[in-house]
Image (spheres, grey):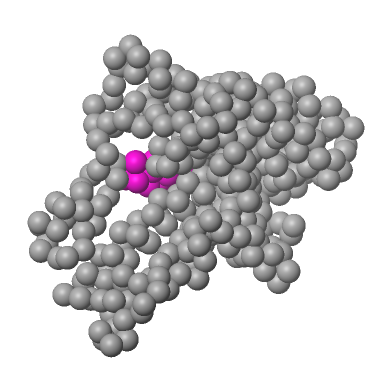
Amino acid sequence: MDLLNAIVALSNFVLVPAVTYGSQLALGALGVTLIYGILRFSNFAHGDTMAFGTMVTILVTWGLQALGVGFGPLPTALLALPFGIAACMALVLVTDRMVYRFYRAQKAKPVVFVIVSIGVMFILNGLVRFIIGPGDQRFRDGENFIITARDFKDMTGLREGLALKTTQGITVVTAVIVVALLFWFLNRTRTGKSMRAYSDNEDLALLSGINPDRVVMVTWLIVAALATVAGTLYGLDKSFKPFTYFQLLLPVFAAAIVGGLGSPLGAIAGGYVIAFSEVLITYAWKKVLTYLVPEALEPDGLVQLLSTNYKFAVSFVILLIVLLFRPTGLFRGKAV
């Protein structure tokens, strides 16, 4: 029974949160890797693009809640999500037309695009803070849990309970659906194949009659959708705060680079690698070890390698290691 209790405690505090967080990072990293693979620059404004799409979703959610519109046991934000995606799509298309297209016409180097994206990042960050404020914004409603820890204990008779939040289940299911649709689009549709050809060899793709403007537009639209979905799922699971999304840029980029920039499959794998690394290193292992070791060897302290305040440091260290020893990432993407 002690082993089962240890497994349940590990699942409750490590496995389930890590899978949920990894799904959110994977969706964010997919947007980063698409921009790098197709448009060939690192978009430092991606975190604040996530924040903008989530902000619009929150505002629409509040409007629907004020009108008494709900989604049953599910969060009302799911009804507002298409509006957030549409607004984010409009934002990235306007930004591309007003900013990035000029530098593409000038055949600017990738480092110039990176610097420009940093400027866009600061503008979006200020815009989001101005509209919705800098503090925490909670917009979750509906049922909080699929199963509570108390119900799990009553069902199993174990000392430890496993709680599954509704937002965790929604995150995993949504991530699976979105990733499946993305891979179907890239591998089965004509536009998706054009994007892959443009990413592999731009000159050959242009000679084949592929319209570069269309490829760029579709890429931005997909990135906007991924960013809004990832940001909304993260906000539902935790809370929305503009500065948090600015900080999320580090683990999102780390996930994309660990998996291999330009590789969608690598972005997904990298998201889970970063998530599990952060959670495992910042988790206090005392409870699990108490079930696994003899009473005489039970630890007195928390057995925590790092405080949760330093979880982004884990992403930073992993990022450094990958850049130093394997810059192409796990799936041999484009070298950074």
Q: Magenta residues?
A: 167-179
Q: Is residue 276 visible?
A: no
Task: Tell me residue 97's x, y (percent).
Answer: 75, 23
Left or right side of 202 for 317:
left
Is 326 above or below relative to 128?
Answer: below
Q: Is residue 173 magenta?
A: yes
Is residue 285 inside the magenta stretch?
A: no
Give the residue at x 75% y 37%: 117
Q: Is residue 292 above or below residue 151?
A: below
Q: Residue 28 versus residue 1: which sits nearer the camera?
A: 1
Question: What percent of the width, then of the height, locates residue 7?
Answer: 27, 69
Q: Main secondary structure of the magenta part?
A: helix
In the displayed image of the protein, which residue is found farthest to the front?
Answer: 300
Q: In the picture provided, is 218 more to the left or to the right than 297?
A: right
Figure quadrant of the N terminus? bottom left
Q: Identify the image quadrant of residue 156.
A: bottom left
Q: Residue at x 47, y 53 (%)?
A: 22
At a point 52% along the width and 49% down the height, the residue shown is 25
Visible residue check, residue 134: yes
Q: Is residue 125 above or below residue 83?
A: below
Quadrant housing the C terminus: bottom right
